Image (cartoon, grey):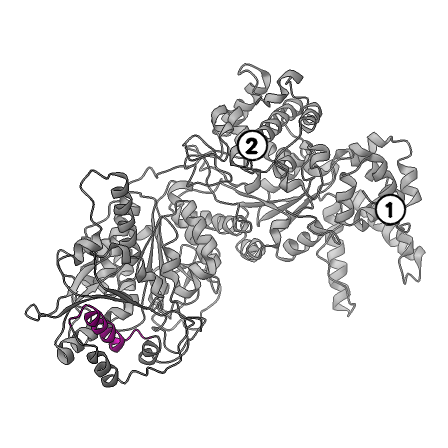
Amino acid sequence: MAALPEMQPSSLSAAAGDADPQETREWLDALDALIAAEGPQRAHFVLESLIAEARQNGVDVPFSANTAYVNTIATDDEVRSPGNVEIEERLRAYMRWNAMAMVVHANRLHPADGGDLGGHMASFASLATMYGTGFNHFWHAPTAEHGGDLIYFQGHSAPGIYARAYMEGRLTEEQLLHFRQEVGGKGLSSYPHPKLMPNFWQFSTVSMGLGPIMAIYQARYLKYLHARGIADTSKRKVWAFCGDGEMDEPEALGAVGLAAREKLDNLVFVINCNLQRLDGPVRGNGKIIQELEAEFRGSGWNVIKLIWGSYWDPLLARDKDGILRQVMMDVLDGDYQAMKANDGAFVRKHFFGRDPRLLKMVEHMSDEDIWRLNRGGHDPQKVYAAFHAAANHQGGPTVLLVKTIKGYGMGRAAEARNVAHQVKKLTDEDIREFRDRFNIPVPDSELPKLPFFKPADDTPEMKYLMERRKALGGPLPQRREKADEHLPVPDLKEIFQPMLEATAEGREISTTQAYVRCLNQLLRDKTLGPRVVPILVDETRTFGMEGLYRQIGIYAPEGQKYTPVDRGEVMYYREDKQGQILQEGINEAGGMCSWIASATSYSHSNRITIPFYIFYSMFGFQRIGDLIWAAGDMLARGFLLGGTSGRTTLNGEGLQHEDGHSQVMAANVPNCISYDPTFAHEVAVILHAGLKRMVENQENVFYYLTLLNENYAQPGLQPGTEEQILKGMYLCKPGKAEVKQRVQLLGSGSILRESLAAQQLLESDWGVAADVWSCPSFNELARDGKAAERWNLLHPTDKPRVPFVTQQLDKHAGPVVASTDYVRLFAEQIRPFLPKGRNYRVLGTDGFGRSDTRTELRRHFEVDRHYIVLAALRGLVDEGALPASKLTEAIAKYGIDTEKVFSLYA
């Protein structure tokens, strides 16, 4: 390791511009006397008063959100841990060993497959003391008296959580040996994945940055449940463990203002400041703890810094002139990392050697003594004191900035080294050193087998382990798969009858209006209504939902302390302590996090709630797709509504707003059931089916519906088509039976109406009959087809299963044309499942959107009625049913520009 640069001696007396050092010393002495006589709180009040007076008199007082680079909690103010320190240390050692063994096993036993299943040891190595403290003393499991604390574990530390569960008897040795080997059903997931371990993990956190923002909205949602009288959450806390490097993710700090604004004193962030991200230092040229302190204090959080362990206390007590504190502040994070990658002699030279007075301070200490000077995150007593202060803070959220060492205890292989995150294998010598450092009772003869270690059940360690969790209600993490309550869903006609009827002559509505009316009907239901959670992101009026403001109110923990400007209007903006709407402002990520909290309420709070989150469809899967994927992992249940959907539907908005691909993205989330309905009755049928599946039957699926802002007459439900709507396809309007020449027109969303118009043109202009099919879900049709295809492959001697698309079209002759307001890939999915030999053409809106009228946009993207007619005629020509001259006639008749420049890349 290269030597660090030499530093000039530090001294507070060298402050520039001090015209009267003696007077300065007198002021400082007075402050010291005040602190000694009346305590830090009185000193704080006096200083704040002086600063306020100075500013009133025009003195420019610079603002700083930072405090000194020392622990926030003074040694004398630390609450003592009630635990058995020695036993807890031994338990941590065993868990460290088992976590290490688990990862090394996974990367040694499969040479035929490359032998690299991966896994992480260094993160848990730095977090073990904090996790142990939480498990032993703070985190409650769900009981009749306590709803249970919610822990967002740092994703890369999963092996350590498994190691503890193994010690508790919750996981077997066989499962540990199958870490990251899940296909056979015995393994453990690489990270916290509720989908893969539905009884264990609660939150998906390894996509870094998502844990912090989800935790904030989860804490707020617990307050919401309590305010609305749905569940008593008054005793519950949300603890979120994050890495210091993770805080560079925009989502990680994106909602800290909300937490302070809503005084979420049920929220604790623990940021593991091991000074390293995946590739190297987080802030090699700076100080990440100071940076984060400023971020959080400036946002109104209670900040507790835990930097130094107990071995530093005597030195800090002797630091009367503040020299040690100044050097602590001066040393950069990159240097701190280098010090922990070396030894005590290196630290003596490059830390204490920065000032002769510091060298004098430690001259009585050996290099081993200096090396023993520990960081706060590895000191059980100081961690306990910090956790206790955080758990008991009231009035706002708390963040703990805890300094640790990445790869702590892993020696030369990883400790404080840039490679720490990637270390998945250890040499025999590394394992021997690990064994010796943590005093693991595994003899040399057994080391090659790398055995897991678990004391006998009657040992003091195991008794202590089980007693501590029993006192806190049971094991954690644990996940509830279904809520204990049952909420019946009324019949379709009972709850959504108005949407099933044809609109009166001259009346037109959009599918967005249909959704809003369904939502209003649902809110009137005495059982389900109170559990509905409408989530809005500042487009309420765009979607015609402003009537809900007065009807059910907007949740605001402090109520409405101002008089809204529209108070005299019928639909005024009403905020209420018991409001039902979650209005997130211009914040799709926040809206999604609230949706996740509500959509998983059955699990984390044993209460079923029904979230409806509506947003511009362009700003859903595209903008917050990572959160939607996490929602799938967390087995969320609820409705996502993509408003103003389609690439040609949103007049005048252009490229950034016009969605032609969200349905394709939705198809990639396995438990997302997605629909692109055209009519009000389709919306009602789909919403009702979703309620049945997610609320009444508690199935682990969620629904995505794209909605339109285009008004038109609604035809009403054809009795008997409900099941076909849900499967994805039904005959909407058959063509004339007596006409010989036939085509099949498929469509969804807004473009289905172009297919209906094309039906008329084909009959009137070309004598061709067209059967028009509404296809609310090409995605569900494709899934059905793939399932049938797979079954047939695996059951060659059984009667083949027939895809639903094939069943629907088999008795309807002629070429097939599918047209949607989405990219061609959307409808292309069903091509393999059409009846054999059928001519299939797909029209779609590939390319970027642009601003214009709906008519012009549909013509531009070649999905309007004229292009549908042309495609249908082309199919008949290809089958020999019409001469090619008919295509030329149609091109001329409809004024189609054959020389128009069009590129799928534009």
The reply to whether dot 1 and dot 2 touch (C-beta < 8 Å) is: no
Q: Does residue 875 show up magenta in the picture?
A: yes
879 left or right, relative to 643: left
Q: Dot 1 corresponds to which residue? A: 323
Boundaries of the magenta span: 862-881
Extreme left residue here? 738
Residue 676 in the image: above or below residue 798: below
Residue 594, given in percent of the width and then of the height, sits at 44, 53
Q: Which amino acid does label 2 sit on?
A: Phe
Residue 641 in the image: above or below residue 651: above
Q: Does residue 10 show up magenta in the picture?
A: no
Q: Which residue is drawn at 69% across and 37% down?
A: 414
Viewer-closest of 160 and 858: 858
Q: Residue at x 59, y 17 (%)?
A: 460
Q: Dot 2 corresponds to which residue? A: 135
Which image quadrant: the N terminus? top right
Viewer-closest of 332 and 566: 332
The Cα atoms of the two marked residues, 1 and 2, are separated by: 38 Å
Mark 2 Cα within 10 Å, few/some/many (few <14, many 20+)?
A: many
